[in-house]
Image (cartoon, rainbow, N blue to C red):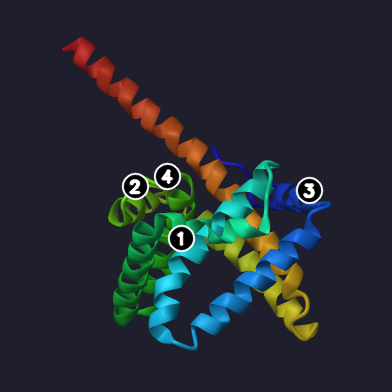
Amino acid sequence: MTTENNVLMRQARRSLDGKWGLAIATFVVYAIIISAANGFPLLGLIISGPMAVGFAIFSLNIGRGEEAKLEQIFDGFKNFGNTVGAYVLYVIFVLLWMLLLIVPGIIAAISYSQTFFILAEDNEIGPMEALKKSRDMMDGYKWKYFEMSLMFFGLSLLCILTLGIGFLWLIPFMQVSYANFYDDLKGEFVLEETDLVDEDILDKDLV
């Protein structure tokens, strides 16, 4: 049984206590770089993956109470090929599903939502393998992720009323909450895999 979303979000708020300045500064730098790069579509496509992984690394460290530094948002470039490849495949898969209907596209985006957290932790995993692992991890948990996203959508509407200033706090909070979601989901996924292995061993013993 995974942890309730509201608990994961409370944990994210506690993790950010005393680190809001760092988290906001990191988000601002990240947003400026991504916005500038997106002015040149090819450049945006190339750096978005490494930056997403770097932001995931930073957010995981905040959520886990480990040392977090602004420069960690550039750590995704250390695994450049895999992070770029994963981002390109992510975009292709989501767009292909979007061509059918909006809903399948949203489901695909949720299915592959853990890809960059997976790459943040595993430098050896390939792009396709990371996407597949994300899809496997999200099996049975897509609605839970969607519910968390709906909560943040509501908060986003409130941020618009602040002329966008509220996003300086919301995005770091959202990212750390998603990092907590990943950690919680990963623990559940490992338990499920262990149970399957144990069942397989038991079946072989009975034979």
How far apart are the alpha carbons under marks 2 and 3? 31 Å
Number of marks drawn: 4
How far apart are the alpha carbons under marks 4 and 2? 6 Å
Q: Which mark is residue 14?
A: 3
Q: Toward which corner of the image does residue 70 lie, by quadrant?
A: bottom right
Q: Which badge, 2 or 1, comes first in the chain's sequence? A: 1
Q: Which mark is residue 202?
A: none
Disc 2: CA contacts within 10 A as few (<14), some (14-19) or many (>=20): some
Q: Which badge, 4 or 1, comes first in the chain's sequence? A: 1
Q: Can the viewer see residue 37?
A: yes
| Circle 1 or circle 3, nearest the eye | 1
Q: 206 or 47: which is nearer to us? A: 47
| Circle 4 or circle 1, nearest the eye | 1
How far apart are the alpha carbons under marks 4 and 1? 13 Å
> For the residue marked with disc 3, what is the amino acid?
Arg
Q: Which residue is mark 2?
A: 125
SS class, disc 3: helix
Query: What residue sits 33% from the left and 21% below the top?
Result: 198
Query: What residue sits 80% from the left and 82% below the top?
Result: 162
Q: Is residue 141 left or right of residue 88?
A: right
Q: Which residue is mark 1?
A: 77
Where residue 101 appears, as percent x and y from the top left, is 34, 79
> For the residue marked with disc 4, what is the amino acid?
Asp
Up-down: is 154 above or below 22?
Answer: below
Q: Which residue is mark 4?
A: 122
Where residue 98 appears, as percent x and y from the top left, is 35, 78
> For the residue marked with disc 1, what is the amino acid?
Phe
Q: Can the viewer see residue 55?
A: no
Query: What residue sits 34% from the left and 47% below the top?
Result: 125
SS class, disc 1: helix
Question: Do the residues under discs 4 and 2 have CB atoms within 8 angstroms?
Answer: yes
